Image: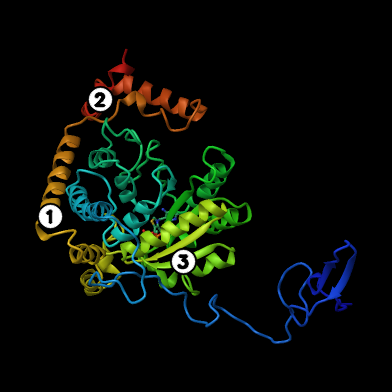
Amino acid sequence: MFRPTRFPPSLRQLTVARTSRGVASVTPKLPEYPHGNLPSSQSPITSTMHFFNSVMDSGKQIPTYRIIDGAGQPIEGAEVPELDRDFARNMYENMAQLPIIDDVLYNLQRQGRISFYITAYGEEAAVIGSAAALAPDDEVLAQYREAGVLLYRGFGIESLINQCYGTSLDSCTKGKQMPVHYSSKELHFHTISSPLATQIPQAAGVGFALKRDPSRRGKNCAVTYFGDGAASEGDFHAGMLLASTIPSPTLFIARNNGFAISTPSTEQYYGDGIAARGAGYGVHTIRVDGNDVLAVYSAVKEARRRCIEEGRAVLVETMTYRVGHHSTSDDSFAYRPRKEVEERKRLDNPLVRFRLFLELRGWWSKEEDDALKARIKADVHAAYKKAEALPRPPLSEMFTDVYGGEQPWNLRAQEKELKGLVRKYGRSWEPWKAELKKFKGEGKEWFD
Ligand SMILES: Cc1ncc(C[n+]2csc(CCOP(=O)(O)OP(=O)(O)O)c2C)c(N)n1
């Protein structure tokens, strides 16, 4: 039979006072909560039946932090971060290069020169504003739309294009990965993986490793980027729970761009977006206007400070809009009206907002804008032409560097089998003869 249990008054209702002679006496104190609280938590006992489905007291949605409006003007009460001219210009230049690179690579895929591509149209502020707020050696575990973080760290357009083409100069993935699955050990950018959300619990692990490393504790954090769709994966919750219960300096940056391919974010959740989940894990959380680069920069800078100083996770939800198709394998006009996209592009362009801010300060001009765009275009064209003239990495490297340490047995077996087939057909069967010519060294090392 169920018997209601009467718990003793909370210990917090009693305070132990010490006299000057050190004699302890117990003085009753007014209970903090009239009915006390459960022994296992700080939850006050209440006689009012109250259901809730919002983390805000008001029942409203979590607010969105913004600094500048569509005309580049600070909104009332906003604190503009202290930025010097060069830093602000560098941020803008990094943002401005993204759509130019995207235009060219998207078209190269359309012409069949690369197999796949993903653009970041509309998310320039979310990506660059956050990149600018990090230390260059914070460990980044991204999704796939964050090439701007790598570029901000100095990866270079050539490296980016070499990865997309899988050339012999693709030092990050040696032609083994699909385009846009970048990686850079030197720039602390972990390899992108296609399965969604795997990077999120990995980031919590990396954050924990940083905390255990005396040379990096209190200095670096792990940063993971993910979309609203990825946040619907179990891995999102695993990562958040891990970083919250085994505290680690892990910064979770959600890019809520309105879509997971064709699924609108409104179908990804019924609650108040991704930010509402942060509080459930006891994680400091902020929602920010992802098209306002200054707001993203300020929010991520503060989020990073908290991460490092408290050694705990922080969640930032950037609200933005995926202007482009999901990838080159998608036609988004099959599931959203072209007009909606055109309107979003026109009404809330993160690049225009920041450019207007810079122009108002006399830090940027139309002439500089034209010159920058022309220079980037020329750089991208030169880089892809160079990449097209390069061979693939040597055939013998196809099985190396997949894992660290010793090559596992299954890869050794696959390598042996392919080697045998190449030796058997590589010099006699026309399709393979032609294919071998594309590799650096033409696979000769396997015939010796
Ligand atoms: C585990 C898994 N399920 C499904 C996919 C297919 N897929 C690739 S991207 C994507 C949408 C992701 O959307 P979101 O996380 O919102 O990021 P966005 O593309 O909008 O930046 C899906 C479903 C996948 N790669 N991995």
Task: Name the N-terminal-most of marks 2 and 1.
Answer: 1
Displayed quadrant of residue 53: bottom right
The C terminus lies in quadrant: top left
- Depth check, mark 2 against mark 1: the one in front is 1
In this orientation, does residue 184 appear? yes
- Amino acid type, label 3: Ile
Residue picked out by circle 3: 286
Vertical placement of 62 versus 117: above or below? Answer: below
Residue positioned 76% across, 75% down in the render: 37
Determine which of the numbered discs, if any, sits on residue 440 in the image. Answer: 2
Q: In front: 306, or 209?
A: 306
Residue positioned 44% across, 75% down in the render: 63
Task: Name the N-terminal-most of marks 3 and 2.
Answer: 3
Vertical placement of 252 versus 72: above or below? Answer: above
- Depth check, mark 3 against mark 2: the one in front is 3
Residue positioned 56% across, 42% down in the render: 209
Splitting the image into four quadrants, where does ligand 1 fall?
Answer: bottom left
